[in-house]
Amino acid sequence: MLNKIFEMQTELNDYVFRKNKLKDKAGQNLNMQSIVNSVIENKLNVNELPNEWLMNYSKAIQEELIELDEELLWKWWSKDEIDIQNIRVELIDILHFLISAMMCAGLDAEKVFDIYKQKHAINLKRQDTNYKKETKTEDDNRSIS
């Protein structure tokens, strides 16, 4: 299913790029593959496509998180109820932009799953070793490939 989500997100992004007549650095029509190719070609400087689109998607994720927060209730004494349907939609909006950002970082569904498994194991190990700020290092994260 994750492969299908990546495929659908690529189609949506390419449609949005085309509809808005967005161009890549060479003046060609922008598409997700041109961003991925920039990662493959190690074009990772500040003015290259991966950074530009990771920034765009990061901002979009932040804005969607704000919309999600606005749906959540913090007054524990209140008798209000959350709008779970809209919350679900906001979470899917976040997923749309997160998948797009993952692609801009050169990830596909298989690589996401592989890195997730590695990071999951690290998180479990951290819990088993009383992980805390005083002993935190990023050494374990650097082992993820």
Image (tube, helix red, strand yellow):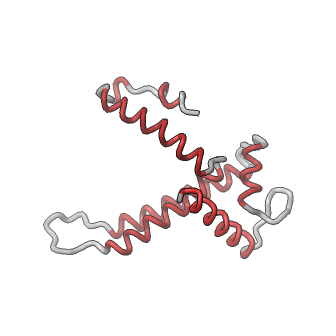
Q: Nearer the viewer, residue 43 or 107?
A: 107
Q: Nearer the viewer, residue 30 or 133?
A: 30
Q: Nearer the viewer, residue 138 or 45?
A: 138
In the image, residue 28 above or below residue 121: below
For the point 61% across and 54% down, the residue is 55
Please state, as top left, top right, bottom left or bottom right, where the C terminus lies in the image: top right
Q: Position of residue 89 (x, y in %)?
A: 43, 71
- Residue sitting farthest toward the left: 77
For the point 72% across and 76% down, the residue is 19
Q: Going by the image, does 75 lie left or right of 60?
A: left
Q: Going by the image, does 40 lie left or right of 71?
A: right
Q: Position of residue 47 (x, y in %)?
A: 74, 49
Q: Nearer the viewer, residue 27 or 102?
A: 102
In the image, residue 122 above or below residue 60: above
- Residue sitting farthest toward the front: 1
Q: Position of residue 124 (x, y in %)?
A: 36, 34
The part of the image, by quadrant, that contains residue 120 is top left
For the point 44% across and 26% down, the residue is 137
Q: Position of residue 52 (x, y in %)?
A: 68, 54
